[in-house]
């Protein structure tokens, strides 16, 4: 439905067409609400344009190259392996573009939903301006997402660098990609480009990679990257960058001394920041925290009446699945009179390395912080038939159980198909059933999931309890 100049008052305004905004706009419109959705750039948000969809497409390309090089292990002859980066990018663009176009078409063809293209700014709690036009609504939903956080690095303003967004435009093979950061974005791109054929160096300020994970997980990720000939430097205390011919020279200071890395390209992957600094929120009573995230209550309401914040900009998850769950919570509460809350959500996510890391619930460190008696079960992927058959035995399965209630506290799977297998644990946790629900179940052989009951059958006290 096209926008008309007279349409200044709406029942609902949705700011942003990321993962939470479009389904909410469509559902409210289908329920008879007069809805306006505003998107200033790309429909689909981070996930569709610079996050999940394009990066996992690129990772799939990189895995094909990796497995082609390993073909001889399986008795298959392929000859030399070459990667055509222009075709790699074209495939990524096709997959991502199809998703983006689908979101936009859905919104523009939904009755009662008016789509505005432009940058909206608040002028009052429930009023915005876009291209000089004032729009008002009974409810406003902020769904503006986030972007790459750029750290203070000496000399960074004088050299070209990439982020998770701008690297989407790369259609060539960097000779040597230097990655600043050590969490999931940095690690995924590092492995991806190494498999495409680049030399890769990771510079991590902390003492280990993915510091939100337990130490055994960090070590397993490090071992994976080192095995693929990625240079990982930990405990980086200071970084300075400058031009060096056609490349970039990175001066690195660690506890072991100073050194320099010369790369052809620099990728900054040090975290995310919310897109809330240019929304005119200073003209509202909407509160933000010290990091710029919109403060919300358990139902995603902000401090301003009639205003909600969903997705990455509220600081509660920053994943596609948590953003979509934000939509589900708001929709259920508004349209069906339910009382769903974000505090009912169990933390779960994956790092899409190959093999992937998947986690749900608490870590060992989380459990020790609350002094909870727990049991732990582990099994190496070398003892998982599916992994052995595929020749991909790196990693392990780990589960954590409350010693008193027998409820599952958490799990961490690192290995082939871990991102799928983790859901069998996740669902039992949501059902609030004891771990014996899984041990009494019959799983298909030969799969990764068939060994999860076995892991639970071999529990022992968590060290330090």
Image: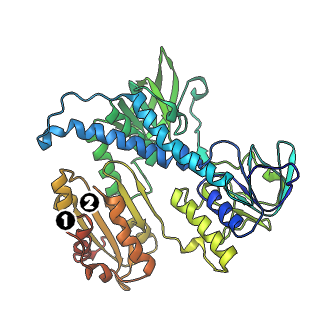
Residue lying farthest to the top in this orientation: 245
Closer to the chain start, of discs 2 and 1, is 2
User: At 28% across and 55% down in the image, what residue appears?
Assistant: 416
How far from the left and from the top, in percent, is residue 145? 63, 51
Q: Is residue 183 visible?
A: no
Q: How many numbered marks are there?
A: 2
How far from the left and from the top, in percent, is residue 69? 22, 35
User: At 60% across and 23% down in the image, what residue appears?
Assistant: 158
Query: Label 1's element?
Result: loop
Q: Nearer the viewer, residue 435 or 325?
A: 325
For residue 257, above or below residue 33: above
Q: Is residue 369 left or right of residue 102?
A: left
Dividing the picture into quadrants, the one containing residue 149 is top right
User: At 77% across and 60% down in the image, what residue appears?
Assistant: 286
Q: Nearer the viewer, residue 298 or 424?
A: 424
Q: Nearer the viewer, residue 164 or 119?
A: 119
- CA gap, disc 2 and disc 1: 17 Å
Q: Is residue 409 visible?
A: yes
The residue that mark 1 highlights is 446
User: At 17% across and 50% down in the image, what residue appears?
Assistant: 391
For residue 4, above or below residue 23: above
Dividing the picture into quadrants, the one containing residue 332 is bottom right
Q: Nearer the viewer, residue 309 or 237?
A: 309
The mark found on residue 294 in the picture is none
The residue that mark 2 highlights is 396
Please tell me how crowded label 2 is: few (under 14), some (14-19), or many (20+) other residues with Cα within 10 Å. Answer: many
Residue lying farthest to the bottom in this orientation: 405
Question: Which quarter of the rendered picture does the C terminus lie within?
Answer: bottom left
Q: Are marks 2 and 1 in contact (CB under 8 Å)?
A: no
Query: Label 2's element?
Result: strand
How far from the left and from the top, in percent, is residue 113? 73, 57
């Amino acid at each position: 439905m096209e926008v008309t100049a007279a349409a200044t008052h709406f029942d609902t305004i949705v700011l942003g067409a990321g993962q939470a905004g479009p389904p909410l706009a469509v559902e409210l419109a289908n329920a008879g609400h007069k809805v306006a959705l505003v998107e200033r750039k790309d429909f689909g948000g981070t996930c569709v344009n610079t996050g999940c969809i394009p990066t996992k497409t690129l990772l799939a390309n990189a895995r094909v190259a990796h497995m082609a090089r390993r073909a001889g292990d399986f008795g298959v002859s392929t000859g030399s392996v070459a990667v055509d980066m222009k075709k790699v990018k074209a495939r990524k663009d096709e997959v991502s573009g199809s998703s983006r176009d689908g979101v936009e078409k859905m919104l523009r063809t939904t009755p009662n939903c008016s789509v505005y293209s432009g940058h909206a700014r608040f002028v009052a709690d429930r009023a915005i301006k876009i291209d000089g036009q004032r729009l008002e609504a009974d409810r406003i939903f902020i769904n503006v997402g986030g972007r790459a956080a750029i750290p203070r690095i000496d000399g960074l303003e004088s050299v070209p660098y990439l982020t998770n967004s701008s690297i989407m435009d790369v259609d060539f093979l960097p000779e040597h990609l230097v990655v600043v950061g050590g969490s999931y974005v940095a690690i995924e791109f590092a492995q991806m480009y190494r498999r495409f054929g680049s030399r890769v160096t990771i510079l991590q300020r902390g003492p280990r990679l993915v510091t939100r994970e337990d130490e055994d997980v960090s070590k397993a990720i490090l071992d994976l990257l080192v095995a693929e000939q990625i240079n990982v430097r930990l405990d980086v205390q200071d970084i300075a960058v400058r031009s060096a011919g056609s490349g970039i020279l990175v001066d690195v200071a660690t506890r072991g001394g100073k050194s320099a890395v010369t790369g052809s390209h620099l990728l900054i992957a040090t975290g995310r920041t919310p897109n809330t600094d240019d929304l005119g929120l200073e003209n509202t009573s909407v509160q933000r925290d010290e990091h710029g995230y919109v403060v919300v209550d358990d139902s995603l309401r902000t401090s301003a009446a009639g205003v909600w914040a969903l997705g990455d900009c509220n600081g509660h998850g920053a994943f596609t699945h948590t953003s979509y769950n934000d939509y589900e919570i708001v929709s259920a509460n508004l349209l069906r009179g339910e009382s769903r809350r974000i505090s009912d959500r169990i933390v779960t996510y994956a790092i899409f390395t190959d093999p992937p890391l998947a986690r749900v619930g608490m870590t060992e460190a989380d459990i020790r912080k609350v002094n909870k008696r727990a049991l732990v079960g582990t099994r190496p992927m070398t003892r998982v038939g599916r992994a052995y058959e595929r020749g991909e035995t790196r990693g392990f399965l780990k589960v954590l159980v409350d010693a008193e209630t027998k409820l599952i506290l958490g799990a961490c799977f690192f290995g082939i198909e871990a991102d799928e297998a983790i859901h069998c644990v996740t669902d039992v946790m949501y059902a609030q059933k004891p771990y014996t629900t899984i041990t009494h179940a019959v799983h298909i052989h030969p799969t990764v999931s068939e060994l999860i009951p076995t892991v639970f059958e071999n529990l022992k006290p968590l060290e330090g309890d």
